[in-house]
Image: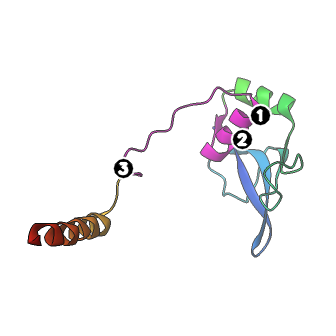
Amino acid sequence: MAIKLRLARGGSKKRPFYRIVAADSRMPRDGRFVEKLGTYNPLLPKDSEERVKMDMERVQYWLGQGAQVTDRIARMLEAAGVREKTDRSNPKKGTPGKKAVARAEEKAAKAAAPADAE
């Protein structure tokens, strides 16, 4: 059985609230889980202590048992100092799209045209 540490959504529409759970990876997101490890309330300010609560002892236990973590949980554990920070590289994210490149070229051509006229 492959265990994952992940978020299970609760709360009502437009008011998210998440449980941090250890669950079988084959179970649905909000379905059956093995153990509740904490909570995450994204509506609270980022500096609030109530935003993320985790039972670190149990999290360490599950990591020791070989549980995998989702990206969001990995970021929370990095912020808590449990895991070392990993580099996330997405070189294409910062590059402009086709339309933005075309607009920049058009703007440069317009700027160059009056300079050539003089």
The magenta stretch spans which residues? 67-94
Residue 57 sits above or below residue 27 on the image: above
Identify the residue position indicated by label 1 in the image: 80
Label total for image = 3
The mark nearer the N terminus, 3 or 2, is 2
Residue 29 sits above or below residue 88 on the image: below
Discs 1, 3 touching: Cβ within 8 Å: no
CA separation in Å, label 1 and label 3: 29 Å
Farthest residue toward the top?
64
Q: Amino acid at mark 3?
A: Lys
Identify the residue position indicated by label 3 in the image: 92
- Residue at image position (74%, 56%) is 8
Farthest residue toward the front?
118
Residue in front for this viewpoint, 16 or 90: 90
Q: Amino acid at mark 1?
A: Ala
Q: Indicate the quadrant where residue 1 lies.
A: top right
Q: Position of residue 118 (x, y in %)?
A: 11, 70
Circle 2 sits in a helix, a strand or a loop, which is it?
helix
- Residue at image position (66%, 53%) is 27
Q: Residues within 10 Å of mark 3 (few under 14, many from 20)?
A: few
Circle 1 sits in a helix, a strand or a loop, which is it?
helix
Residue 10 sits above or below residue 110 on the image: above
The mark nearer the N terminus, 1 or 3, is 1
Q: Indicate the quadrant where residue 103 lies.
A: bottom left
Q: Which mark is residue 102?
A: none
Identify the residue position indicated by label 2 in the image: 76
Discs 1, 2 touching: Cβ within 8 Å: yes
Q: Is residue 54 magenta?
A: no
Q: Amino acid at mark 2?
A: Met
Residue in front for this viewpoint, 39 or 84: 84
Let me know if residue 94 appears in the view.
Answer: yes
